[in-house]
């Protein structure tokens, strides 16, 4: 059975816009079974590549816990005498798997139930341009094409008129009788 607890964590006291949701998933355990003396806590079960995975091995009723080992798919990942937290910065798909922890409460050794963590690959962001931006770019492209066409047309006409001027003969007249 899983219980999801949501609360808001204030990053800076007094700032209302820096409230970030913090969700903790707890695997509920009953104290009458030996395997339920420990539980593995995580902030979520599905992560994106590049996220940080935080795991915490928690003892029943906060009893002192020592000799803590974290496992992924049955392989030991971290051992510590007193540190009950395990962090994986910049997670990738190879970090997906079943995690559990082992530790000692008093003189007895216990294991938590496993938690399946999934790390998803990078998502391709969908970028949607508003209609007015698309229209603007289409109009700008059309104006560029028309302007370029006009430029070459005027340039051709100017070259043609320069050639005609060279071939044109001017005759001066002083009056109507000179014609």
Image: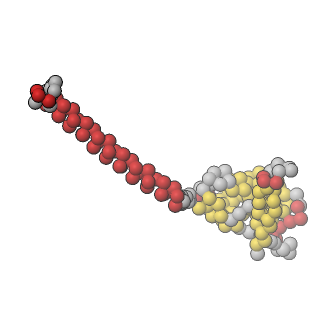
- Residue in view at x 25 percent, y 36 percent: 158
Query: Which residue occupies the foreground of this view, 140 or 128?
Result: 140
> In the image, residue 76 lies at what x, y percent?
68, 57
> In the image, residue 72 lies at what x, y percent?
66, 60
Query: Can I make out residue 155 in this image?
Result: yes
Query: Can I make out residue 111 in this image?
Result: no
Q: Quadrant of residue 148?
A: top left
Query: Which residue occupies the foreground of this view, 160 or 130?
Result: 160
The quarter of the rendered structure image containing the N terminus is: bottom right
129 w.r.t. 167: above or below: below
> In the image, residue 160 lies at what x, y percent?
20, 37
- Residue in view at x 84 percent, y 74 percent: 30
Furthest-front residue in this view: 177
Query: Which residue occupies the foreground of this view, 77 or 157?
Result: 157
Q: Quadrant of residue 175?
A: top left
The quarter of the rendered structure image containing the C terminus is: top left
- Residue in view at x 63 percent, y 51 percent: 90
- Residue in view at x 71 percent, y 53 percent: 87
Query: What colouring does the structure picture have?
Result: secondary structure
- For residue 105, side relative to residue 76 (left or right): right
- For residue 79, side relative to residue 148 (left or right): right
- Looking at the rendered structure, the number of numbered marks drawn on it comes to 0
> In the image, residue 68 lies at what x, y percent?
78, 56
């Amino acid at each position: 059975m899983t219980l999801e607890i949501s609360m808001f964590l204030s990053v800076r006291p007094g700032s209302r816009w820096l409230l970030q949701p913090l969700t903790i998933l707890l695997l509920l355990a009953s104290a009458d079974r030996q395997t339920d003396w420990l539980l593995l806590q995580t902030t979520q079960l599905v992560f994106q590549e590049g996220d940080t995975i935080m795991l915490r091995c928690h003892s029943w009723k906060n009893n002192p816990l020592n000799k803590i080992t974290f496992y992924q798919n049955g392989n030991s990942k971290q051992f510590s005498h007193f540190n009950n937290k395990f962090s994986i910065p910049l997670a990738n798909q190879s970090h997906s798997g079943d995690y559990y922890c082992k530790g000692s409460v008093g003189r007895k050794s216990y294991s938590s139930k496993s938690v399946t963590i999934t790390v998803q690959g990078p998502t391709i962001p969908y970028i949607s341009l508003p209609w007015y931006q698309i229209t603007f770019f289409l109009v700008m492209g059309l104006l560029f094409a028309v302007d370029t066409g006009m430029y070459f047309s005027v340039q051709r006409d100017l070259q043609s008129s320069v050639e005609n001027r060279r071939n044109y003969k001017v005759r001066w007249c002083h009056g109507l009788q000179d014609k």
